[in-house]
Structures are given as structure tokens and as C-alpha cells.
Amino acid sequence: SIQASINGAKPGDTILVEPGVYRETGNGRYGLRISTPKLRLIGKVVPGRGEAGKVCLVRSERQETGIYAAPAGCEYDAFATSCPDTLHGFYLRGFSVEDFPRNGIQTRWVDGFEFISNESVRNLNNGIYPTVSANGLVRDNVSYGSLDTAMWVAASQNVRVINNVLYDSVIGFEITVSNNVWVTQNKIYDNTLGIGLFHPNGAGNPPLPEMKNWVIEHNDVRDNNRPNDAPLGSFQGQLPSGIGILLAGVSDHVVAKNTVQGN
């Protein structure tokens, strides 16, 4: 059990996981639940072996979210906006998280996180989802098959989003209620909407005193004309197909030097 190793880990430990398909049990609503500071969770992917070389986490029982990192006792229920603690440090690399009905990879109240070379596959709400977190790096991941957003930075500070591939979702990439988010060298294609920069009212996050300095540069945003199959009546379900980059009710941001075509 990967979770048993996590539960026995000390702050700063590294857990290496061999290739295979993992179905964790007895873990409530999560595939994996991380609350150990500075934990490094690394899938030992074997290149050239295709599916056989992956470290795949798939849904078991009634799990909602694949990998959830947050302080102990701080869950994502009922629009919770505060937690008495902060989880300092979480590193995740080499995992393929597949077919969870809510989110693929999510943080809340984490200071210092890195998601490197992971894959989110058909996680139906959001694929890769750092929220209420700070000082993060999201690099070289692939995310697709979400009915909301392949990758969403929400209510977070100081996040770098570099060289990810985001496709076949309603929204490829989204930012709301955040500060200092740098988004560069990503490939975003075959979504309903490529990139969405949204007012807090569009996302259910309470506004901050400042929400500024989102820099969107040197991204390739192409062919985002996918039909919208989001749930009827949802915010994302109202988005029209065929927009590369949409700014809705936001200010103090930079959009520059992107390739935006075929939308």
C-alpha cells in the first residue's frame, strides 16, 4: 500500500513507487492523502514500456479525488476557506492519476509544492488543481479529459506553470483569485476554451484584497473548438466553444507573446 508507506513516513522522507496499477483501499474519499511535511512521492516510471512502465493510481471504492495534500483535518468540504495549520512542502513526480470523479491532484493550505512530470487522465472535475496554496512549481505534466479544467490555479500565491500539455477538457488552463502566477511554454489545445482568467464570481472562491500579476506568455494555444459537455447550469457549461484566451472581469495582468491560432 502506498498509503501505508505515507502514513509511516517522517517529515522529509522520500517514497519510491515501482510501476504498476495501484488501487488503495480504506482511505475514504481519497486515493492518497498526504499530511506529512516535506514528503517526496516519486513514481519510478520506466521509459519506453508504455502503460507497463507507468505508476498508475486508479479509483477504488467511493473515492472522489486521486491525490490530496493538506494539513491533517483540513479537507475540501463546504467551501472551507481557512485551516489552522499549513503543510510545508510536498513533491510529486511520475504518477498517472486516472478516472476519479472529482479531482486528480489537489493541494490545499500547502506552502511549497512541486508537481513534476505527472499525468491526470479523465478526472472529471479538475485534473491538476493547486488551491489555497503558495510557492509552487507545476512543470512537465500532462492533463486531459476533465469536464471542468485540465489545470486550475485557484486562491494561490507565487505559482510557476511551465511546459505542461493540457487538452481534451472544457477549459485547458484557468486562474482565479490568485497572485503572482507565471504561465509559460505550455501547449493548450483541443479544449472548449484554451485559457480562462476569471473573476471570483465565476469560480466560487472568495475574493482577495489583491488579485494581480498573472503573466501568460510564450504559450501555444491552438484549435480550442471542442464541444462543451460540461454539466448544464454550471459556470463552465455556459462557455462558448472556440476561444483561445478569455479574460472575464479581471485586471492587472499580462498576456504577451503567445501563439494563439485556430480557435
Image (cartoon, rainbow, N blue to C red):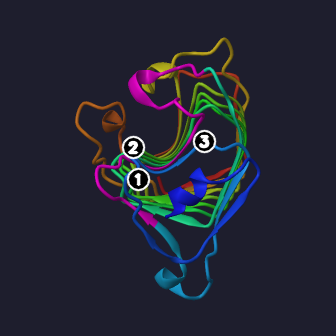
Residue type at mark 3 is Ser
Circle 3 sits on which residue? Answer: 35
Label 1 SS: loop
State the image coordinates of residue 59 (x, y, percent, origin top left).
Answer: 36, 59
**Alpha-carbon neighbours of circle 3 within 10 Å: few (<14), some, or many (≥20)?**
many
The image shows residue 166, relative to residue 75, as above or below, that is below
| Residue 189 visible in the displayed image | no
Instruction: Identify which residue is drawn at 22% across, 36% down.
Output: 232
Circle 1 sits on which residue? Answer: 169
| Residue 9 visible in the displayed image | yes
State the image coordinates of residue 228 (x, y, percent, origin top left).
Answer: 31, 47
| Snapshot quadrant of residue 113 | top right
**Alpha-carbon neighbours of circle 2 within 10 Å: few (<14), some, or many (≥20)?**
many
Residue type at mark 1 is Ser
State the image coordinates of residue 185 (x, y, percent, origin top left).
Answer: 70, 56
Label 2 to label 1, Cα distance in Å?
A: 7 Å
Looking at the image, is mark 1 or mark 3 earlier in the sequence? 3
- Foreground mark, 1 or 3? 3
Circle 2 sits on which residue? Answer: 148
The image shows residue 224, relative to residue 112, as above or below, that is below
Front in this rendered view, residue 11 or 115:
11
Residue 148 falls within the magenta-colored stretch: no
